[in-house]
Amino acid sequence: DKEGNFTESLEEFRARVFKESTEYQQVCEVARYLENNMKDKFLFKDVTGNYSDEAMVRLSDTLLTNNTAHIGGSITNHGKLNIDNCIFRENMSKDDAGAIENSIHGTIELTNSIFTKNLAEDNGGAISNNGTMHISNTTLNYNVSGKTGGAIINWMVSSFTGNSKAIGKINIKKCLIENNVAEREGGIANGGSLTVKDTIIKDNTSNDDNDIPSSPEKV
């Protein structure tokens, strides 16, 4: 209508946009449609009636494959995400995180899953973490990073004064991390807080021959 809101159905919207528009116009139309019409489907209202992003998203029994993004080949998480019994295979990022990017505000519970043959052109062949992650009973193998962290990169941040602060926090338990490849740190590139327990990290390849450059708190 004249106020810029959509009045057509989702089916009408799809038919019009993907038939009549250029690729750039499609992206703009999709973003505008989601903003105006799909808010109730992605955000939850609290008791005051305000929208909240505190809801937990659960992903289970799912194959995520052949996805491509600038950051986070399959998923970029800014909230609370629970992943169980999923396979991330042959996803690609043109920057960091071949499969999953977890932001500074993100929390991920990851269990019983497999990450294999994912590629990040920069850092974190499978996972790039700036937030909090708990990973258990999960296999990460044959992932590739063009720079650092063949399987995982766990970030720190540097200030203007030159001081560094750990921002990424990862707890890893009963996992297998093997045969990943990176220019540096073939297994895990750690600048944050890292705890590893009952986990096998082996046969990862990098130019510096390091699986984990900074010693984890526990192994």
Image (tube, grey):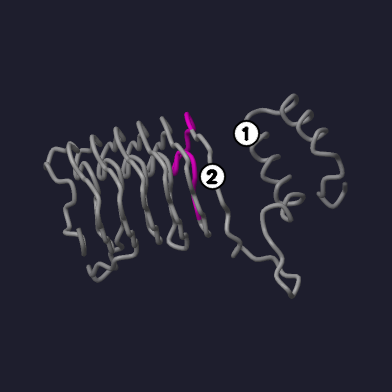
User: Any mark on residue 162, and which?
Assistant: none
Which quarter shows the C terminus? bottom left
* Residue 24, numbered label: 1
Name the kind of residue labelled 2 in the image: Ser
Which residue position is annotated with label 2?
60
Mark 2 packing: few (<14 Cα in 10 Å), some, or many (20+)?
some
Q: Residue at x 31, y 57 (%)?
A: 155
Magenta includes 66? Answer: yes
Disc 2 to disc 1, how far (Cα)? 32 Å
Q: In the current view of this chain or complex, which residue is farthest to the bottom?
A: 48
Q: Residue at x 41, y 34 (%)?
A: 92
Q: Amino acid at mark 1?
A: Tyr
Disc 1: CA contacts within 10 A as few (<14), some (14-19) or many (>=20): few
State the image coordinates of residue 65 (x, y, percent, origin top left): 48, 31
Verify whether residue 38 appears in magenta.
no
Magenta stretch bounds: 65-77
Which quadrant of the figure has residue 90?
top left
